[in-house]
Amino acid sequence: GAVVSQHPSRVICKSGTSVKIECRSLDFQATTMFWYRQFPKQSLMLMATSNEGSKATYEQGVEKDKFLINHASLTLSTLTVTSAHPEDSSFYICSARILHRDRMANEQFFGPGTRLTVL
Amino acid sequence: DQQVKQNSPSLSVQEGRISILNCDYTNSMFDYFLWYKKYPAEGPTFLISISSIKDKNEDGRFTVFLNKSAKHLSLHIVPSQPGDSAVYFCAATRYGNKLVFGAGTILRVKS
């Protein structure tokens, strides 16, 4: 099956520092990756859509200068939380999409998530 | 505007019985629906999906039903097992674009 990894799985940092989270598709190429954020007991909220070789598309309300996304290759996307503050503490999850020939038949495969705690 | 709704925050079922998780949506343009299972502090795991051109899709113990006129889909798990205890999210998409998730339903299967 399709495997997506994230690194690190858990990070604790001081307020004001920047944190980079990596998302890799291990056994397939993903032209599109997605970044989500999940608060406790809430649903996954899409932050941005990352397309290889182009700028990310951010959802309304998500600061693109705060959450920098780079999708440099077909297997790697990174999310950098810049100048992190305690309110950025959350569970960040990436996903990668396999696009089938039948465009309607596609699924997203999720990474295991990264728990960010900003002190 | 919640386009995908899971109105039951939790469901408790006895082992061996059927679990039915429900999901409603408002956007008639959605053409593909998915169910994901999620454990705490882990990413969601894909379970089963259904295209809007079908009304049923079955995979082992999991069956998803789609009622387009009612904009409603449901996930049936038969028989339910304790290992099925998790949070279940339904999601919808249009033309394979971004997924819109429901709020999730916590399923507890009692042994």
Image: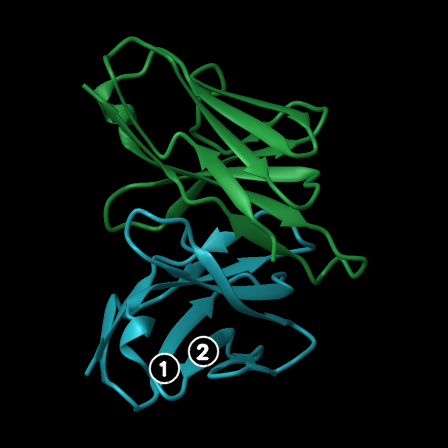
Circle 2: is it few (<14), some (14-19), or many (20+) Cα within 10 Å?
many
Q: Residue at x 48, y 75 (%)?
A: B72
> Where residue B104 sits in the image (x, y, percent)?
34, 61
- Give the number of callouts: 2
Q: Position of residue A83 (x, y in %)?
A: 34, 11
Whole-angstrom CA distance, mark 2 to mark 1, is: 7 Å
The chain assigned the colour green in the figure is A
Q: Chain of mark 2?
A: B
Residue on which the image places disc 1? B20
Up the image or down, B23 lies above or below B59; here it is above
Quarter of the figure with the C terminus of chain A: top left
Which residue occupies the foreground of this view, A88 or B81?
A: B81
Q: Which residue is mark 2?
A: B74
Q: Residues within 10 Å of mark 1 (few under 14, many from 20)?
A: some
Q: Which amino acid, mark 2?
A: Ser
Q: Quadrant of residue A20?
A: top left
User: Is the C-beta separation of discs 2 and 1 under 8 Å?
Assistant: yes
Q: Quadrant of the rendered structure where residue A82 is?
A: top left
Residue B106 seen in the figure = yes
Residue A39: image location, x then y, percent: 28, 41
* Rendering coords of residue A68 (x, y %): 50, 19
Chain letter, colour cyan in render: B
**Vertical relation: B90 (above or below) A10:** below
In what element is the residue under mark 2?
strand
Residue A60 is marked as none
* Residue found at x 66% / y 79%: B54
Q: Quadrant of residue B38?
A: bottom left
Residue nearest the viewer, comparing A5 with B107:
A5
Q: Residue at x 65, y 64 (%)?
A: B31
Q: Secondary structure at mark 1?
A: strand
First in residue order: circle 2 vs circle 1: 1
